[in-house]
Image (cartoon, rainbow, N blue to C red):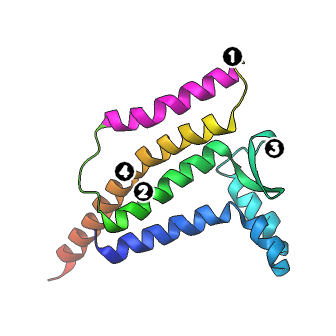
């Protein structure tokens, strides 16, 4: 993927991840406070937002739980790394399972009441999941761009 596309991808993921802390930014810029309910509702489409699972920074809650924050952080860090060191391999399915299984086990154990929810464990397992999912997401983006180019060239007489 071209360098400029990788930067655009990183910036999109960066702004999405920064939006998690929109309320924190809104306290610094009061004009933004009008948009807090809309942004929070937008993030509610991708996270349950249970109050006891949210991350608090300077007495301001994030718009996602710690597991989702870990997922987005993994995405963001790998998108940043990918700017400088392009990922050029097809990730094996095993890699996805390495990211998924710890998050799944943690979720099941908490749901069954075997142990109490830990924001640190949820964040870490979310991070593992986010990094492995990024590899598949990035591969899909490369294939989509290649397919778009192929269709464009086929239409030229």
**Crowdedness near tag 1: few (<14), some (14–19) or many (≥20) residues, C-alpha within 10 Å:** few
Q: Position of residue 98 (x, y in %)?
A: 40, 33
- Residue 103 sits in quarter: top right
Q: Which mark is residue 51?
A: 3
Q: Are marks 2 and 4 in contact (CB under 8 Å)?
A: yes
**Crowdedness near tag 3: few (<14), some (14–19) or many (≥20) residues, C-alpha within 10 Å:** few
Mark 3 element type = helix
Mark 2 element type = helix
Q: Is residue 102 left or right of residue 59?
A: left
Mark 1 element type = loop
Question: Which one is in front in this view, the residue at disc 2 or the one at disc 3?
Answer: 2
Residue at x 77% of width, y 66% of height: 24
Distance Cα–Cα, label 1 vs label 2: 32 Å
Distance Cα–Cα, label 4 vs label 3: 30 Å
Q: Are marks 4 and 3 in contact (CB under 8 Å)?
A: no
Q: Which residue was labeled with disc 1?
A: 114
Mark 4 element type = helix
Residue at x 52% of width, y 64% of height: 13
Q: Position of residue 124 (x, y in %)?
A: 56, 40
Question: Which one is in front in this view, the residue at disc 2 or the one at disc 4?
Answer: 2
Residue at x 59% of width, y 64% of height: 16
Distance Cα–Cα, label 1 vs label 4: 32 Å
Q: How many badges with numbers are in the image? A: 4
Q: Position of residue 96 (x, y in %)?
A: 39, 38
């Amino acid at each position: 993927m071209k360098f400029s596309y990788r930067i655009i991808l990183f910036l999109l993921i960066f702004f999405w991840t920064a939006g998690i802390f929109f309320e924190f930014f809104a306290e610094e810029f009061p004009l933004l406070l009008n948009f807090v309910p809309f942004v929070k509702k937008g993030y509610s489409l991708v996270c349950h937002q249970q109050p006891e699972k949210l991350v608090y920074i300077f007495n301001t809650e994030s718009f996602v739980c710690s597991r989702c924050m870990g997922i987005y952080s993994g995405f963001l860090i790998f998108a940043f790394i990918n700017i400088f060191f392009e990922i050029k391999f097809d990730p094996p399915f095993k890699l996805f399972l390495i990211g998924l299984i710890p998050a799944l086990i943690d979720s099941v154990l908490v749901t069954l009441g075997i142990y109490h929810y830990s924001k640190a464990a949820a964040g870490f397992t979310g991070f593992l999941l986010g990094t492995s999912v990024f590899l598949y997401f990035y591969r899909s983006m490369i294939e989509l761009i290649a397919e778009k180019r192929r269709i464009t060239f086929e239409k030229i007489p």
